[in-house]
Every structure is written in C-alpha cells, then in structure tokens.
Amino acid sequence: MTPEQIRSSVLLTPQHLYERQQAGEEMTILAVQSINPYTGRPSFTGERIPGAIDTQAYEDFQSPPSPAGGQRPLPAIDVLQDKARAWGLRRDRMIVVYDADRSMTAARAWWVLKWAGLCDVRVLDGGLPAWVAAGLPTAVDATVPAASDIVLSAGHMPEFGADDAIRLAEEGVLLDARIRPNYIGGPVDPSQPPRGHIPGALSAPAPDNVTDYGNFTDSATLAEMYAALGVDGQKPVGVYCGAGMSAAHTVLALASIGVAASMYPGSWSAWVHDPARPVVVGARPHGKSA
C-alpha cells in the first residue's frame, strides 16, 4: 500500500467521510463523549456529525480501576459486547470514531474496538472541530440505532504487561507517551504513587502526534519523528502512558505510518502498583533509580 492508503486505513479526513456518507455507504459513527478528568468540563458541544451515536470514553471503553489493572483496565468483553450490540455495530460496516479533543479518547475507543475483533475501525482525523472547520453539516439529536447481534472476542491487538516491559526496552523500543514532566518524575507526596518512567523507556509525548489544529501531523513527519527514537520497522515497539489513553493515541499514530506497536494497557498506573518495580527519574532513559 502507498503511504496515503496506509494512513486512510486508520484515519479519515472529514471530507473523505462526508463523501462516503453522500455516496450512501453504510457505516456506524461513534461520537466519543467524555468529561475532562482534570477540569470536569464535558466534551459535548451541542453538535454531532449526522448519524453519530453517543458513547462515553470513561465508561464504555474501560473497566473500573483496580490496583493490578491500573486506572483504566480493559473492559470485560461481555460488557463491551452488550454495548456494541446496542450501538448496532456490524462486521460488514466501517466504524468511525471521533471526539472533540485531538482524538485522545477516540484513539482509545479505536484500540479497544480493534482489540475486541472489529477489523475496519477508523478515527476521524481532527475530530468534530475539523468537521466543523470544513463547513460540513452537523446535527443536534443523537441517532438511536437498530441493535445488532455482533459477537466480540478479546485479544486482537498486541499488548504487553509489566514482565515484558524492560525486556522490550532492551530488545526493541519502549515509548512513554505521557507528557515530559510525568516521564521525568521526581519527588512526590509519600501518599501518592511514584513519578518517573520504566527503565529504558524513551519519552515520546502523544500530543506531539498532532498539529496545533488537532489533526494528526503528516505521515512523513511522523515517520521522521519516530525514526529518531529508533522505530525502524524492524525492532518490536511497545507503548505505555499513564493508564492506556495516550498510549493508544501513539499506537494509532504509528499505525498510520504502517508500524505495528503493542500497548501496555495498565501502563504506569499498574506498573507502580508493585513497589518492587524500578522507577527511573530524570530526562534520560536510564537515569538514577528513585
């Protein structure tokens, strides 16, 4: 496939999506709504892409927090299946997910749906802001879909756990998708989890995947950015973040340039559950252990 075909297999531009809608293609569009965990601000703006079905980022695509599973464990497959049926998901229809904030929560939905065995899932590049900026029509009311009888199964996306992380850093490329201050870490209140990173991990903040306008940067730039971190298409690549949200964003960005990467679903929030696991502080991959 050409770079353009690879990118469009996971990312759709607003114009491309609109053209496919106008051509009468049957598809399912999921609006990934959320409440910002830091500000408490809801993402819903009163506008939707016509035909979109509402989903909830922090309810539908994760299980409740647990010490071993981290802040955002993967959803139970039977629970996700019930929701997928209520959304009317079908294997013979493309599924498009979007959000209103740089595809951060849409990427998590993309990863979870792919993990559950759905093959043709794509993210609207730039989300609702890009759709509106393109002058495309919006709707106020959410769509109520006809239920389906889809059957899902877990494990269709590559993932790794704590026991694999350091080995992956040694034998391949382990990327930390959190913002740099969280990667660097440092002293915290003793009642709070440690801050820092997994030994050997390289800092690759997920916000760098997108432009100031919220769409994913061009494929050539993404390829150059990750090549500088050792992602050469030959070595295995793994990604983690705080709790499996930004990591999914980076897995999506890598998929858009044809690089398959595994994800640590529990990520840092699961890693620090075990006090015996090493924590590195500082800006270097192998800094002084805390």
Image (cartoon, helix red, strand yellow):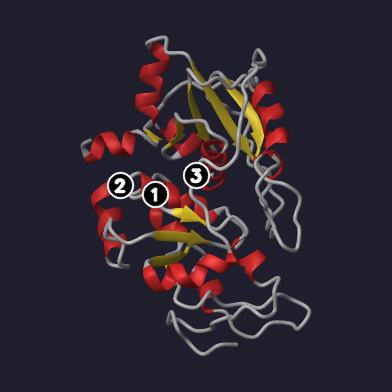
In the rendered image, is residue 173 in sight? yes
The CA span between labels 2 and 1 is 7 Å
- N-term mark: 3 or 2: 3
195 and 216: which is toward the camera: 195
**Residue 35 image position (x, y, % from top left):** 69, 46
Mark number, residue 30: none
**In this rendering, position of residue 70 left or right of residue 4:** right
Residue at mark 3: 157
- N-term mark: 1 or 3: 3
Q: Is 56 drawn above or below residue 211 in the view shown?
A: above
The CA span between labels 3 and 2 is 17 Å
Q: Helix or strand or loop: what does disc 3 sit on?
A: loop
Residue at mark 1: 253
Residue at mark 2: 257
18 and 206: which is toward the camera: 206
In which quadrant of the rendered image does the N terminus lie? top left
Circle 3 residues within 10 Å: few <14, some 14–19, many ≥20: some
